[in-house]
Image: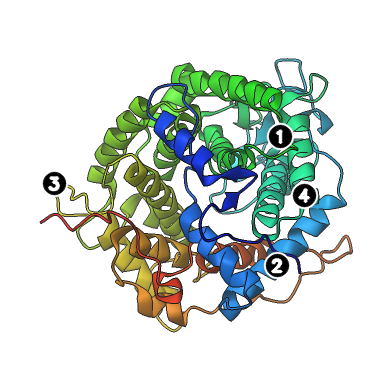
Amino acid sequence: MKLMQGKKVKKVMNGMTTDVWLILALMTGSAGALAAEPAFLNTAQMAVVRQQLHDHKAAPQTTGAYQQLLAAADSALKKPELSVTDKGMTPPGGSKHDYLSLSAYWWPDDSKPDGLPWIRKDGQVNPASKNDQSDGVRLADFTARVQNLTLAWYFSGEQKYADKAASLLRTWFIKPETRMNPNLNFAQGVPGISPGRNAGVLDGRYFSTRIVDSLVLLRGNPAWTDNDEQQMRAWMTDYLQWLQASKIAKKEGRTENNHGNWYVTQVSGIAWYLGDKAVIGDMAKLMKSKLDVQLKPDGTQPAELARTRSFHYSYFNLQAISMMAVLAQKNGIDLWHYQTPQGGSVLKSLDFMARFTDPAVPWPYKSLDQIRVRPVPLLSWADNATGKKRYQQQIRSATFTLPPAVKPASGGYHEDVTRGAVTEAERETWLLSLPSFATGYVAPDAPESKK
């Protein structure tokens, strides 16, 4: 297991010395400036983890998460490039370069001869939305592979991972014959109702999270050239303009549930990459207005509890909020301690979810599924951001046991959704946001509670 060597004085990080990173940091702040660090990841903390792995002093959970990461990256090395042009269906606009997905919870109406219009069955996933005919699964797979490969390179120093990540990025975003057009006009369409809906903007959250942070980490690597960076910034600029100007995207931004919060986080992540701090400030204000109506003083989120997958969506909404809080803090804005007029807050809602990370504590609402470890990374982010040990007990006691692999009717083993979610939660907790009690890392300028 080869790991990148760390230096005490002038440590080389991702192909650049800390001097260069300092220069980039000074550049950040005006529109168009380079982001000096990832939007949602903490590279200072990750550097500690990387050194621990190199010195064979990492916690067992960290070592396990790292081995899982390498396995995923090695698997990605063997797989072909992915492109929106690979899908079977052609979008209504006539170009396979446009992204196309079908809404997961909508089904043909059995009472109609042609099944149209489709009808909604909340929480029940239509397999037709998860095949190669559209791009939904392909986008998730592509962004996951890029992230896995980039992180594998960061922690191991093996150039082969960065080479593959850069190749995947060029195929999806840059090469004329395979690039995606920078819009989500035909995302989460519903046959008989609409070729694309505002809910489909949610699909693009991975561009802001997995892709933006991978791009920042890869900057300066020989695999990712200045020309690649320029073209990627042009794509992201066009995509941000679409997010801000298109009717369906603006409608998504007005929603008052997880969709609206993911819109805020997605726009902010893209703006961070492009160096537009003003947009991030605007999005932070918008997020506060959404929290005012979503978070109750007892920590519950009524809009998410109303769903058939109430546990998942309570977590999912808080994931968007917490990621925005991480990014906002990098811009001098404290969302962690923001108090709504009714007395709700992010921390109170995390307090509410924290108790249910224990499988022995019954979830008091109807829910089709409950992956109890999913909120654990959010608890770690909050503790690290605030400099407190509010959730130390829940983080320490969390177990990331994978359920048995599922053998689908078509044959062949695969990791189902639950296995993927558990693996992701363990990685985000023990590899990417290692709890402060495990590293001794203390967040600089951690915001104090505002009474």
Tell me which residue sits at (53%, 69%) in the image.
430
Which badge, 2 or 4, is on the more N-terminal residue?
Answer: 2
Task: Give the residue type that dot 2 points to.
Answer: Gln
Which badge, 4 or 1, is on the more N-terminal residue?
Answer: 4
Which badge, 2 or 1, is on the more N-terminal residue?
Answer: 2
Vertical arrangement, residue 268 with respect to residue 71, above or below = above
Vertical arrangement, residue 48 with respect to residue 42, above or below = below
Total numbered circles? 4
Vertical arrangement, residue 46 with respect to residue 53, above or below = above
Q: Nearer the viewer, residue 14 or 142?
A: 14
Task: Give the residue type that dot 4 points to.
Answer: Gln
Task: Locate residue 344: give its quadrant.
Answer: bottom left
Q: Nearer the viewer, residue 451 or 9?
A: 9
Tell me which residue sits at (88%, 64%) in the image.
412
Label placed on residue 224: 1
Helix, strand, or loop for circle 4? helix
Provide the residue designation for mark 3.
Answer: 341
Task: Give the residue type that dot 3 points to.
Answer: Pro
**Image quadrant for the C terminus?**
bottom left
Give the alpha-carbon distance from disc 2 to disc 1, as whole Å. 25 Å
Which mark is in front, 2 or 4?
A: 4
The answer to whether the residue labelled 2 contacts the one labelled 3, judged by CB atoms less than 8 Å apart, is: no
Q: Residue furthest front?
A: 9
